[in-house]
DNA sequence: TATAAACCCTGGAGTTACTCCAGGGTCAAG
DNA sequence: CTTGACCCTGGAGTAACTCCAGGGTTTATA
C-alpha cells in the first residue's frame, strides 16, 4: 500500500484541476514530484497537503506571491508568525478598498439606471451620464510643450 | 485655428494615456484617425469625445465589449435604449456579486486575523485555518477509473 | 543654425493566474 | 488486443493594458 497518488488523484484530493498543479510546478510554487517509470508525476501526502493549502489560500484571495511567502514560512516552526498576520492584514485592507470602490460604483450605476425611464438612444440618461460634457473635451490650443499640428 | 489634436493632447483631453488610445485603435474600438505629413495621428472633437466616453465607461467598470456595443448604438438616435439599460443592469448585478463575494471573504479573513494573537509559526491560527485538515487529504486507494501506481 | 528636449511612430514583450488545446504516450479492463 | 481513461509536453489564448527599444519629427533654445 503506497501512499503516492497520480496528478488526477492529487487534483481531486486538493480540490484543484490537474492543470493548476502543473502550472504551480512550472512557476516553482511546488517542487517537481517524483515520477513513475511511465513518467507520471506521483504525489505523497505532504505534497497533497501543500496543494490543499495553496488552493485554500487562493480561494481566500491571496496572490500567488503571498502564498509563496507563506509556504516558505510554514516549515520554520519556531519563527514568529507576524509576517503571516501582516500579509493577511494587507490582503484584508485591499479587499476593503475593493469593496469601497465597488460600492461607490454600485451607487453611480444605480443612479444612472433609475434616471433612465426608457425611450430612444438620443434621450438615454445612461448614455448621457457616460458621455463627456462638451466643455470638458473642447480642445484648447494653450497646452505647452506639445507638438502643434 | 485647426481643432485637430495630437495623440498626447487627445490623451490629456480624454483623461487616458496615449498608449490606451493606440490600443483601442488596434482592437478596433476607435477608428484609425487621419495623420499629419510626419505620420502623427490627429484627432478631431468627435473622436476626442468618443475617447472620453470610453474612459468614463471603463471607469464605471464596463468591459471593452460592453463599451463597444454602447458605442455602436450611440449614432442610432431613434433606436430604443433598452439594450443600454440592460447592459447597465447586468453590470450592476455582477458588481453586486463581487461585493457579496468580497464581503464573505472579508469576514473570513477578519475572523482569522482576530483568532491569531501572535507567537510562532507552529501555532499560528491563520496558517492553521488555511491548511487542509488531515482527514481531507489522506489518500484513499478506492478511487475508480484512475491509473494505479 | 545647431542641437537638445519633448513628442511621436511601430512592433513586441510582459503582466495575472490560469485554461484549453493538439498530438502524442501509458495503463488497466474486457 | 483494443478501448477508454488517464497522463505527458509545449504552446496558444484570455482581459486590458503597460512598458520598452530603437527609431523619426517638431519645437525651443543657445
Ligand atoms: Zn523550523
Ligand atoms: Zn436609457
Ligand atoms: Zn440614427
Ligand atoms: Zn499568526
Image: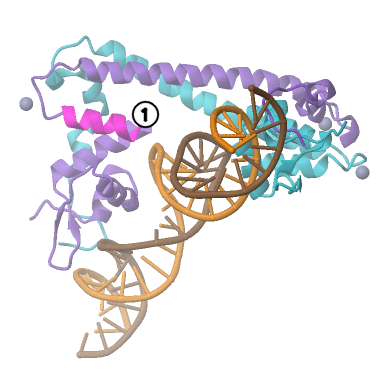
Chain colours: A cyan, B purple, C brown, D orange
Residue A81: x %, y % from top left? 84, 37
Q: Quadrant of residue C17?
A: top right
Chain holding disc 1:
B
Q: Nearer the viewer, residue A133 or B20?
A: B20
Give the residue displayed 30% in from the left and 32% down from the top.
B65
Residue B73: x %, y % from top left? 17, 27
Is residue A145 visible in the rendered structure shown here? no
Q: Give the range drawn in magenta.
A: B62-73
Q: What element carries label 1?
A: loop
The answer to whether C5 appears left or right of A4 in the picture is left
Q: Quadrant of residue A16?
A: top right
- Label 1 crowd (10 A; few <14 / some 14-19 / many >=20): some
| Magenta run includes residue B67 | yes
Q: Which residue in the structure is indicated by mark 1? A: B60
Give the residue displayed 70% in from the left and 34% down from the top.
A54
How many discs appear? 1
Amino acid at each position: 500500500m503506497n501512499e503516492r497518488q497520480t496528478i488526477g488523484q492529487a487534483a481531486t484530493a486538493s480540490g484543484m484541476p490537474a492543470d493548476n498543479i502543473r502550472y504551480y510546478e512550472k512557476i516553482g510554487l511546488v517542487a517537481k514530484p517524483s515520477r513513475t517509470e511511465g513518467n507520471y508525476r506521483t504525489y505523497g501526502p505532504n505534497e497533497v497537503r501543500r496543494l490543499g493549502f495553496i488552493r485554500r489560500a487562493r480561494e481566500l484571495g491571496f496572490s500567488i506571491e503571498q502564498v509563496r511567502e507563506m509556504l516558505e514560512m510554514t516549515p520554520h516552526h519556531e519563527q514568529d508568525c507576524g509576517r503571516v498576520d501582516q500579509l493577511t492584514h494587507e490582503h484584508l485592507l485591499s479587499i476593503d478598498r475593493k469593496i469601497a470602490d465597488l460600492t461607490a460604483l454600485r451607487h453611480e450605476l444605480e443612479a444612472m439606471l433609475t434616471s433612465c425611464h426608457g425611450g430612444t438612444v438620443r434621450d438615454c440618461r445612461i448614455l448621457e451620464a457616460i458621455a463627456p460634457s462638451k466643455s470638458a473635451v473642447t480642445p484648447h490650443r494653450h497646452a505647452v510643450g506639445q507638438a502643434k499640428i
